[in-house]
Structure formats: structure tokens, C-alpha cells
């Protein structure tokens, strides 16, 4: 299910995004990588793009952990 933070396969391929980074936040990694390349990978540059990407990754992690917790609770209730 594509969202506003998911890039299309053609965009990912055109920007040479590695397979490991093609997740729900893939649309945010493209401008981050472009910024990093333009700024010669200076660690103090591209803070805004990096923060947006890391926040998306964290929100995705929290969403997945909540879903897992709900599954575990449902499984425990089914056992009873």
C-alpha cells in the first residue's frame, strides 16, 4: 500500500537506492542521498533531510511494535 513516503520502483531504480532501503520511507531517502552527494557527505549537512528520514523510520518501528503487541494480546486471549 503506497503512501506519501513511499517512492515508486522507477524512482528508486533511477536514483539507485539499494534494496535494503526500499521500505515505507523510501521517498525520504532519495532527497537525503542527493543532499549527501551534493554536500560531499559532510556529517553536519543535510540535517533536515536526515531527521525526516529517521523520524519516519522510528514511526514505522513504533507502528510495527504496536501491531505485534496487539497480535500477542489476541493470541493470549484465544488461548484462554
Image: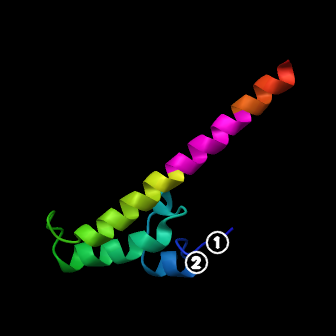
- Circles 1 and 2: CB atoms closer than 8 Å: yes
Left or right of 32 in this view: 15:
right
Check the image and report above or below for 53 versus 7.
above
Magenta-span inclusion, residue 70 = yes
Residue 53, percent across and down? 39, 64
Check the image and report above or below for 9 versus 55.
below
Would you name the residue on which mark 2 appears?
A: 8
Left or right of 52 in this view: 12:
right
Judged from the image, the secondary structure of the residue bearing numbered disc 2 is loop
- Residue at x-position 30% and y-position 65%: 50
- Residue at x-position 57% and y-position 41%: 65
Q: Nearer the viewer, residue 8 or 79?
A: 79
Label of residue 62 in the image: none
* Res 78 → quadrant: top right
Q: Nearer the viewer, residue 70 or 3?
A: 70
Determine the CA span between mark 1 and mark 2: 8 Å
- Residue at x-position 17% and y-position 76%: 39
Judged from the image, the secondary structure of the residue bearing numbered disc 1 is loop
Check the image and report above or below for 38 versus 20.
below
- Residue at x-position 64% and y-position 71%: 2
Left or right of 78 in this view: 12:
left
Would you name the residue on which mark 1 appears?
A: 2
Which segment is the magenta one?
61-71
Check the image and report above or below for 44 versus 8.
above
Mark nearer the N terminus (1 vs 2)? 1
Residue 69, percent across and down? 64, 35
Amino acid at each position: 500500500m503506497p503512501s506519501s513516503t513511499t517512492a515508486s520502483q522507477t524512482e528508486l531504480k533511477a536514483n539507485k537506492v539499494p534494496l535494503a532501503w526500499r521500505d515505507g520511507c523510501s521517498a525520504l531517502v532519495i532527497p537525503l542521498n542527493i543532499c549527501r552527494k551534493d554536500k560531499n557527505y559532510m556529517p553536519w549537512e543535510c540535517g533536515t533531510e536526515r531527521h525526516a528520514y529517521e523520524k519516519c523510520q522510528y514511526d514505522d518501528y513504533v507502528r510495527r511494535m504496536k501491531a505485534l503487541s496487539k497480535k500477542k494480546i489476541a493470541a493470549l486471549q484465544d488461548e484462554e
